[in-house]
Amino acid sequence: MRVFKQISVGFALSAAVFAVQAADVTGAGASFPYPVYAKWASEYKAASNSAVNYQSIGSGGGQQQIIAKTVDFGASDDPMKGEDLEKNGLLQFPAVIGGTVPVVNISGVAPGQLKLSGQVLADIFQGKIKKWDDAAIKSLNSDVKLPSADIIVVYRSDGSGTTFGWTNYLSKVSASWKADIGEGKSVKWPTGQGGKGNEGVAAYVGQLKNSIGYVEYAYAKQNKLAWTQLQNKDGKFVQPEQKAFAAAAANADWKSAPGMGVVLTDEPGATSWPVTSATFILIHKVQDKPAQGKAVLAFFDWAFKSGQKSAEALDYVPLPDAVTSEIRASWKDIKGADGKAVWQ
């Protein structure tokens, strides 16, 4: 399986020292940010000699593990609701912004060549459009040779924040999808087959001719998959790229939702990518092991200060300084059992 081979190999090498360092921290959750978290972990290890072991298991698993206190931090692309944060004693903050993209495996179709609208995309994933030469697809792609072949849909089989963002978007652009399927970390898919993680979906689409799936953009690039253009809310067809993700997030009101849990799908703007999202970190407000909590915050403090170039190189969008300042201010609420803040 050729999924992030270079990144994951480097990450595995640093994993060998995790068990022997007291300041090492563990995290688990969303696969959407795994490429940038792995890169940050490698660079942070070199800068601080402290290791961060992050496991890409899906947003649902990340939420479950942090609630169970089996990891030092959880990660989710599906922002947790205020009542659930309160119930579980968790603090949530965004870490980075990225984009989810449709990827296809169609002979002769190059990355960025195929155009899709939100409605057509919803109809494909709902099983209403069954062949690549359907009139609805051809009407958007008069210059693309499309086969008369059955479309193979690939979706996430695990509880996934990427799926939450994807189905949230489809619910916004298709009344039929909203009524019949809805949104969530997992849904009852009407057609297709499932792959585990962004890694699994990328692998299946790479292997299956005439397939379509959805992955975080870095997975599409690293696996040399053909992504598509999407028509955005302003009616413009746009390519997935960092500036399009940044445009979608430009007017985000981070204070409008508990835990800064802003959803960035189907945002207005001529250059906005329609399926943009932030990914979030979850950490307990009361730390049984304050040194571990401080180590988690030290890692993300370093990432906000020193990880921007690495994030950009992987086509993520770093958070603005004003947002990271707000995040650091919120860390005063993370305390040890003695009531003392772990981050000064």
Image (cartoon, rainbow, N blue to C red):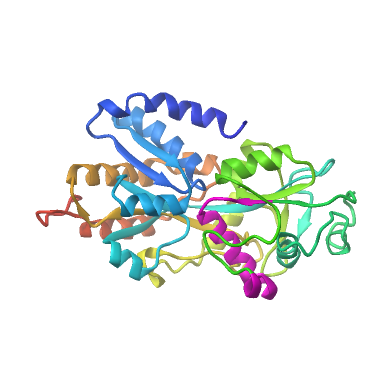
Q: Quadrant of residue 63?
A: bottom left
| Residue toward you, 328 or 201 | 201
Principal secondary structure, stretch drawn in magenta? helix
| Residue at x 40%, y 32% (from the top left corner) | 43
Judged left or right of residue 290, residue 192 is: right
Judged left or right of residue 249, residue 299 is: left
Q: Does 24 appear in magenta? A: no
Marks counted in the figure total 0
For the N terminus, give its image quadrant.
top right
| Residue at x 70%, y 43% (from the top left corner) | 205
337 shown above or below 173? above
307 shown above or below 263? above
Q: Does 165 appear in magenta? A: yes
Q: Position of residue 243 (x, y in %)?
A: 59, 53
Judged left or right of residue 15, residue 77 is: right
**Whether residue 104 can be seen here:** yes
| Residue at x 54%, y 59% (from the top left corner) | 186
| Residue toward you, 19 or 306 | 19
In this picture, which residue range is highlighted in magenta? Answer: 154-180
| Residue at x 24%, y 34% (from the top left corner) | 23
